[in-house]
């Protein structure tokens, strides 16, 4: 147990160290805001990394910018708005809900609805066909076959 | 066949269409939210005259271009040839934004490859670059007479980009009233 704990702490330390630069803040709240922001904002050069994980020049500059603004008392929203105004919604890992992103946000649920609807139709059709009433001639043929079968069994 | 049978097929075709369109797009080209907005009013020192400042307000009444370049940028070298040709044939002012570069390297680079810029300004720390939403070099902005950013070319200006997009746009902007 103890070794696992030690290993886990080491892993934790490593991810923090991925961003080499260290910024000092007046309050722990500011430090938390900074950490949240660099994890939520995307590095535009290396598109699949956030600012915290990237070591590109631009990510360093943007981390510096975030730190400066937070130290000057900017709120998280102000910093995000600043970045979006210059780099667009793409800079956020969590895109806002608006007309152009509706499909992105609700598309999967729409797919689920369609799948459930399709499934219901399929199941209903199957149960309908099972209850289908047979025509009198087919019924007679069927009972004849079944009788034959009974006789075979009694032999 | 019942018409319902076609529903999933149509849905699938639509999905394929969306994905096919997605494949033709370059994910590295992030559209700039600054298009249609005023050019950021950041003053910067001039490369050849460090004591003098330049800011976009000085360009009011003119259609101009801002080209982000650096001596360390390999794609800029190919673009530079195109830009040199462009300024020989066009009167549009071309401002160079020397992005995160050493002044000595930048000056030497212009001396070696030719200087197409009306003037260059220095953004050593990349702070002005953030204001312009620069995320890669080279990038080129087209600004109209009222100081509004009208277009952003991401990546090098090529002959094709010039002929199909930039030159027609510049022509249209020239006839707009300031």
Image (tube, coloured by chain):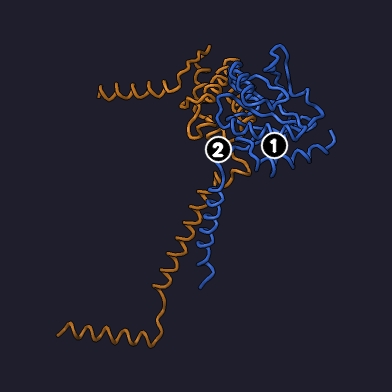
Chain colours: A orange, B blue
Residue B150 image offset from top left, x and y in percent: 72, 36
Q: Nearer the viewer, residue B36 or B69?
A: B69
Q: Chain of mark 2?
A: B
Is tag 2's residue or tag 1's residue first in the polypeptide sequence? 2
Taking the spot 59% from the left edge, 45% from the top edge, the residue there is A102
Q: Secondary structure at mark 2?
A: loop
Residue A147 image offset from top left, x and y in percent: 25, 85
Q: CA distance from mark 2 to mark 1?
A: 17 Å
Q: Is residue B148 left or right of residue A87?
A: right
Circle 1 packing at 10 Å, graded few (<14), some (14-19), many (20+), is: many
Q: Are callouts 2 and 1 both on one chain?
A: yes
Q: How many marks?
A: 2
Q: Secondary structure at mark 1?
A: strand
Question: Image height check: is A128 above or below B78?
Answer: below
Question: Looking at this rendering, what residue extends furthest in the front direction?
Answer: B112
Instruction: Give the numbered dot on residue A86.
Output: none
Q: Nearer the viewer, residue A77 or B116?
A: B116
Question: Looking at this rendering, what residue extends furthest in the left direction?
Answer: A155
Taking the spot 63% from the left edge, 44% from the top edge, the residue there is A99
Question: Image height check: is B109 above or below B63?
Answer: above
- In this figure, which residue is indicated by the disc labeled 1? B151
Residue B9 image offset from top left, x and y in percent: 51, 62
Taking the spot 66% from the left edge, 26% from the top edge, the residue there is B114
Q: Nearer the viewer, residue B2 or B118?
A: B118
Instruction: Give the numbered dot on residue B28.
Output: 2
Question: Looking at this rendering, what residue extends furthest in the right direction?
Answer: B177
Image quadrant in which the C terminus of chain A is located: bottom left
Residue A68 image offset from top left, x and y in percent: 58, 17
Residue A95 image-quadrant placement: top right
Q: Chain of mark 1?
A: B
């Amino acid at each position: 147990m103890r070794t696992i704990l030690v290993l886990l702490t080491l892993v934790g330390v490593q991810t923090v160290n991925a961003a080499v630069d260290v910024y000092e803040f007046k309050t722990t709240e500011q430090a938390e805001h900074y950490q949240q922001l660099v994890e939520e904002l995307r590095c535009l050069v290396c598109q699949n990394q956030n600012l915290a994980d990237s070591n590109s020049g631009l990510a360093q500059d943007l981390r510096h910018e975030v730190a400066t603004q937070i130290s000057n008392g900017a709120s998280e929203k102000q910093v995000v708005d600043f970045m979006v105004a210059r780099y667009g919604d793409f800079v956020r890992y969590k895109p806002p809900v608006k007309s152009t992103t509706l499909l992105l946000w609700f598309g999967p649920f729409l797919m689920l609805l369609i799948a459930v609807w399709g499934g219901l139709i399929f199941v209903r059709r199957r149960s309908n066909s099972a209850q289908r009433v047979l025509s009198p001639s087919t019924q007679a043929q069927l009972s004849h076959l079944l009788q034959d079968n009974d006789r075979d069994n009694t032999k | 066949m019942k018409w319902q049978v076609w529903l999933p097929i149509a849905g699938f075709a639509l999905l394929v269409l969306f994905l096919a369109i997605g494949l033709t797009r370059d994910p590295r080209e992030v559209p700039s939210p600054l298009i249609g907005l005023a050019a950021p009013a950041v003053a910067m020192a001039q490369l050849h005259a460090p004591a003098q400042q330049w800011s976009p307000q000085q360009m009011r009444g003119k259609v101009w271009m801002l080209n982000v370049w650096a001596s360390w940028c390999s794609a800029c070298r190919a673009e530079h040839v195109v830009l040199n040709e462009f300024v020989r044939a066009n009167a549009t002012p071309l401002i160079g934004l020397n992005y995160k570069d050493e002044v000595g390297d930048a000056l030497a680079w212009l001396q070696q490859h030719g200087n197409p810029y009306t003037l260059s300004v220095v953004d050593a720390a990349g702070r002005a670059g953030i204001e312009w939403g620069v995320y890669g070099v080279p990038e080129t902005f087209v600004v109209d007479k009222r100081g509004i950013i009208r277009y952003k070319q991401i990546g090098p200006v090529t002959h094709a980009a010039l002929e199909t997009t930039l030159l027609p746009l510049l022509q249209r902007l020239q006839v707009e009233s300031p």
